[in-house]
């Protein structure tokens, strides 16, 4: 028996309705915040991620699906959204748009070769937001607010926001030198990856999962101690805006995120729900001033986040939040007789054109079997059409909730069903 590749999952119809509800909620929130959808290719030239995400990151070094196409070009399946959006921003000169900053969102599939586990797949779904063209601290607060609003409006309560500042380039250089000095004496005690990171990007040592219990981690220099005055002021402004709009947060000096492009504000949103699992992060992001220039564009400040959809669905399950989806079918047409079956095809098409969810039997079942099918679909109304009704140009409408039924003229069916479905009545 053929199975889906490891690290991928099929979403069957019973699941997709729940996903569609969540996605529609996200789209509505983005509409209210005046964010617009962008759709980028599933694959990019590998250089986009090498330059955009950073050569020293685990994503680039270990997790990318990279291959050579028939033209000899190095192509990579999209592992994250920010680099692709930034590339599109530069390519189409969106920095020249009249409305600034440019506020974008995406719902897209990403691909990462990592060890599959619950909520962490090799093909994953991600919701992301990018704001390009503003270095106002209030934008940082807005982006965080949007992410928190998604969780809150879906009913999640056990969530926690953690923030930090990585400072500007000057602050990061000072902190980098302090980290090298701190970890060099114990370099041989660190994992192989961290030994390499200490030379290439020491900040990433703080993000190591293997060495997080090493004593040197607890005494590592805090980035907050190396922020220059400008960076301190920026971070203070972000915190003031968060407080002003009523968002609670914790400051965690060890929060560095896993991508090279971050500076100034970084944040993660975590689940505190019982039984959620060891990996608690639901979403993460931050400011990435400098990335647009790296990809060939003009100097453009930017901020964004990525939210794992699988992890969002897990969090909803962990908090036992039911998603309000209507599983019921509006109408099921039961046809008895050859001529009635032909007319049923027209009736079904007419109802569908009026926006009414309608189905019929396609297995040539007898009337009893068709009624059982209507029951399995939890149809609100069954419309019964036989050759006798057809001769009289009538159709029987039966409410499955009350059992009441009556005959109505075929030429008034659409208006009648619209009235019944809106008003929830059986009286025609």
Image (spheres, rainbow, N blue to C red):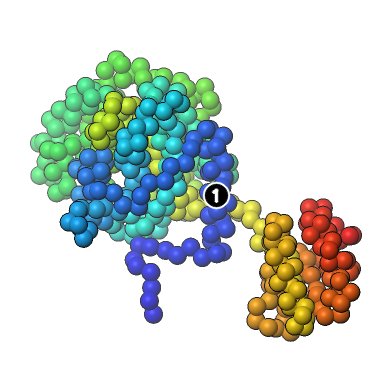
Identify the residue at horizontal 75%, vertical 73% (top origin). 343
Left or right: 421 as drawn, with respect to 146: right
Left or right: 154 as drawn, with respect to 310: right
The residue singled out by tag 1 in the image is 22
Identify the residue at horizontal 14%, vertical 49% (top origin). 192
Provide residue 64's location: percent of width, then percent of height: 26, 53
Provide residue 275's location: percent of width, then percent of height: 47, 54
In the rendered image, the vertical position of residue 419 relative to residue 168, given as above or below: below
Q: Is residue 321 visible?
A: yes
Q: Is residue 269 visible?
A: no
Identify the residue at horizontal 53%, vertical 33% (top origin). 33
In the rendered image, the vertical position of residue 338 relative to residue 35, given as above or below: below
Q: Nearer the viewer, residue 167 or 373?
A: 373
Identify the residue at horizontal 27%, vertical 24% (top origin). 168
Image quarter (top left, top right, bottom left or bottom right) of the C terminus: bottom right
To which quarter of the image does residue 141 belong?
Answer: top left
Provide residue 361's location: percent of width, then percent of height: 68, 76
């Amino acid at each position: 028996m053929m199975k889906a590749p490891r690290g991928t999952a099929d979403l069957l119809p019973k699941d997709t309705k729940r996903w569609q509800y969540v996605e529609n909620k996200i789209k509505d929130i983005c509409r209210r915040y005046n964010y617009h959808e962008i759709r980028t290719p599933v694959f990019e030239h590998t250089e986009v991620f090498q330059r955009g995400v950073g050569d020293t990151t685990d994503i680039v070094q270990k997790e990318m699906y990279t291959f050579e196409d028939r033209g000899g070009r190095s192509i990579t399946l999209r592992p994250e959204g920010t680099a692709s959006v930034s590339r599109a921003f530069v390519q189409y000169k969106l920095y020249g748009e009249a409305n600034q900053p440019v506020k974008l969102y995406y719902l897209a599939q990403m691909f990462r070769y990592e060890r599959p586990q619950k909520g962490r797949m090799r093909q994953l779904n991600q919701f992301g937001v990018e704001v390009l063209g503003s270095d106002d601290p209030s934008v940082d607060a807005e982006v965080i607010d949007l992410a928190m609003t998604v969780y809150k409006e879906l009913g999640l309560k056990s969530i926690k926001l953690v923030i930090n500042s990585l400072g500007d380039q000057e602050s990061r250089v000072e902190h980098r030198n302090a980290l090298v000095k701190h970890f060099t004496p114990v370099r041989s005690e660190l994992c192989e990856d961290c030994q390499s990171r200490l030379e290439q990007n020491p900040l990433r040592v703080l993000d190591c999962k293997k060495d997080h219990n090493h004593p040197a981690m607890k005494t590592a220099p805090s980035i907050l101690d190396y922020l220059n005055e400008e960076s301190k002021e920026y971070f203070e402004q972000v915190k003031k805006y968060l407080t002003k709009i009523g968002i609670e947060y914790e400051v965690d000096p060890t929060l560095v995120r896993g991508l090279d492009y971050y500076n100034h504000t970084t944040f993660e949103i975590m689940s505190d729900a019982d039984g959620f699992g060891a990996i608690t992060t639901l979403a993460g992001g931050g400011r990435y001033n400098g990335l647009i220039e790296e990809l060939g564009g003009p100097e453009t400040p930017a901020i964004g986040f990525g939210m794992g959809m699988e992890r969002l669905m897990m969090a909803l399950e962990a908090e036992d939040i039911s998603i309000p989806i209507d599983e019921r079918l509006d109408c099921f047409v039961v046809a008895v007789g050859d001529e009635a079956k032909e007319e049923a095809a027209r009736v079904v098409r007419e109802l569908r054109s009026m926006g009414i969810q309608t189905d019929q039997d396609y297995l040539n079942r007898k009337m009893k079997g068709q009624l059982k099918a209507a029951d399995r679909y939890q149809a609100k109304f069954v419309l019964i059409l036989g050759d006798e009704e057809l001769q009289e140009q009538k159709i029987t409408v039966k409410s499955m909730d009350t059992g009441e039924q009556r005959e109505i003229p075929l030429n008034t069916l659409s208006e009648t069903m619209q009235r019944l479905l809106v008003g929830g009545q059986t009286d025609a």
